[in-house]
Each structure stands twice: as structure tokens, then as C-alpha cells.
Amino acid sequence: MDFEWAWLLLGLPIAFILGWLASRLDWRQMRILQRSAPRAYFQGLTYLLNEQQDQAIDVFVQAVQSDPDTVELHFALGSLFRRRGEYDRAVRVHEHLLARADLSAVDRARAQWELAQDFLKAGLLDRAENALRPLEGTTLESQAQTALLYIYERTHDWEQALRLTARMTNEHERAQLAGKQMHYLCEQANEAMRQQAFDRAAALLAQAKAVDAAGVRPGIEQVKLLLAQGQHRQAVEWALQVSEKMPQTLPLLAGMWDGTIFDALQDDQLLLQQVHTALRVHYETEASLDVLLALVAIERHMGLPRAGAWYVEHIRRHPSLVAAANWMELQQQDPVIERALDKAMQPLLNYRCLHCGFEARNYFWQCPGCQSWESFPTKRVEELHT
């Protein structure tokens, strides 16, 4: 019994000494932490609050070099600068992160992606493209491909866009991109038409139709190709075939038919009558302004007596300044009034993007404002309000 009490009395001082040493070590560790990372954080925050952002970045850069736990802080800081439009500062933050040798693969890919976003927001598309390429094979590859596709579309690099979509392996994405591939081929065909490389344009349009058989654009572009080659009769015949299969294309096709085409059909009254019938049937089904204007033009060309009456009928069914202005022009009334009406109706003949509201006199398959595909309805602005 005496022996056990002796051990107990000896153990109490030892336990006290060990506890005291442990507490001293804890306080020492706390003082080390206070002297290192927190001081750098607080100093950086002080600079930010005082709008001394360059100094804040320098402090945070020093902190990240000594403490890997500040990586998230730098991501937040870079995102903050980008949202404020301070792209050069955001680039500095993300480039300093990428310069670290001990950065994990996941964080490195994330920093590379954030750097690409900095360049994209700043409008430096070539530098953004270079920043996105290293993300191939990473977990962010899909997002990088989408961003690259945006760059190629923005710069009208249709060949690169087509090659990129061909590399996308996700079946769901490929199904969605079939329509875009069709547009890329049609855009290249348009460029070939402008260069009068008609054989190349025809081959590209054939590819576009094969890629997306349900797309309406290849048929319309084929009509444009025939017109560019001066093959007016073949163009009209093709347009009638396309509009029969896809009635929604007739307003766009009708916008291509002018007096030159009707003159070319003068010796083919049967084909001219087929065009007239197609326009009339479509107008009675859906009162399109483009179809109305083409219908009046062809009836005047054919010498039919009630050509101008279509305008009056349209105004009764659908109050229209465009129809009224065109009717006044036929009546050859006061030229001053005619000019005033013509000026007033011009904005009503624009097309309007349903996504961003961008307006243009010409029809665009891709909106110049928001880059959306097929966001322009085939109706003019006046028709959208009726």
C-alpha cells in the first residue's frame, strides 16, 4: 500500500510538468500562426478596403507562396477582379497561381480555366484560345470546348468550329451540335458563293443536308446558289419544292423573288402560275408580309387587275403601316406623304432576335448580338406586334 502511494506522489509532478510543456507549445504555435498567415490576410484586406489593389495582390501572392491554404482565396480574388472589369489584375492572380510548382492538377486546371475566362471577358480571343488548349484531357475539357466553339463562331472560323464539333465525343452533345455543323457548312458555302466558287459551295451544301436532313437552311441556300449562277428558272423550281416540304421557308424564299426573276419566267407561264398559286395559298393560310409583297409583285407582272387590292384586304385583316405605305405608292398620291410613310415603315420591316432583341433589315441565321442560332423568326417586326 505504501509503495502505491509513493508512485502516485511521484506521478503528479510529472503530469504537471508535461501539461505545462504542452500548453507552452500550443501558445508558441499560436504566436507563429499569428505572425505569418493571418497578418498577411489582414494586411491584404486592409489594402483592399483602402482601394490599394495592387498592393493587396502583392501581399496575397506572397501569402500563397508560403501557405497552400490560400489558393481558394486567390480564386475568389481573381473572380472579384474579373467581375469588376479589372481583367489585368485577374490575369495576374491566376498567372501567379499557375506559376506555383506545388499546385495540384485539379487546381492547376481550374486556374487555367479562370485565366481563359479573364481573356474572354477582356475580349482577347486569341489569348483565350491559347489558354483553353491546355485543358484538353482535364475534367474541364467539356467547358473548354464550349468556350473554344464560342471563339470560333465569334471570329467566323467555321472550319475550326467544324473540326472541334467532330472531336466532341459525348453523344448527347453531338446530337445537339448537328444543327450547328449544318450552319457551319452553310456559312462556308456562302463564303464560296461570294468568291464565285460555285462547285465548292454546292459540295458544302450537300454536306450540310447530309449532316442535318431536317434543317431548313440548306434548301434556302441552294436557291441562293442557283440565283448567283443566273439559273433563275431552276432556282424557282427548287424554291417551290422546298416550300412544299417546308412551308415555313416561303416567307424567306419570297423575299428573293423580284422583277428580275419574274422577267426570267416570262416564257414559262405555267411555272409563273405555280409561283402565284403557292404565294396565294400560303398567304391565305398565314398572312406574311413578305409573301404579300411578292404576291402583289407577281400579279402586277402578270397584269392581273386586283393586285393592289391585296394591300387593302391585308389592312382590313391586319392593320399594317407597311401595307398602307405600299398601297399609297401604287396610288401615286402625294409624294411627300409617300416619303413620310416609307420612312415610318422602314423600322417595321426589320427582323428581331427573340433572345436579345437585336434588329436588322436582313435575315440572319446567327444573331450578331447574342450569337444565338435561328433566333430570328421569319416575321418582320410589324408582324410580331399583331
Image (tube, rainbow, N blue to C red):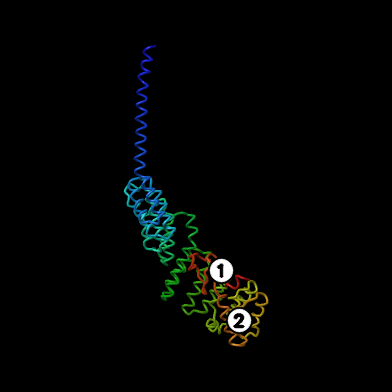
Identify which residue is drawn at 37% across, 38% down.
30
Residue 29 horizontal/vertical position (percent): 35, 37
Tell me the amino acid under the disc marked 2.
Answer: Ala
Amino acid tagged 1: Pro
Residue nearer the viewer, 349 or 170: 349
Name the foreground residue: 150 vs 34.
Answer: 34
Q: Secondary structure at mark 2?
A: helix
Which residue is under mark 1?
A: 377
250 left or right of 116 in image: right
Q: Which label is found at residue 175?
A: none
Give the number of the mark in front: 1 or 2.
2
Rendering quarter of residue 169? bottom left
Quadrant location, the C terminus: bottom right
Residue 9, position as x, y percentages in the image: 37, 18
From the image, tell me which residue sits under label 2: 325
Which residue is farthest top? Answer: 1
Residue 106 in view (yes/no): no
Element type where label 1 sits in the image: loop
Measuring from the top left, give residue 85's x and y in whole percent: 42, 60
Percent across and percent down for residue 150 are: 44, 62
Vertical position of residue 141 compared to residue 303: above or below = above
Mark 1–mark 2 Cα distance, whole angstroms, equals: 23 Å
Q: Is residue 328 above or below residue 62?
A: below
How many other residues sit within 10 Å of disc 2, few (<14), some (14-19) or many (≥20)? Answer: many
Counting other residues with Cα less than 10 Å from the Cα at mark 1, is it few (<14), some (14-19), or many (20 or more)?
Answer: some
Query: In the shown orientation, is residue 343 left or right of residue 24?
Result: right
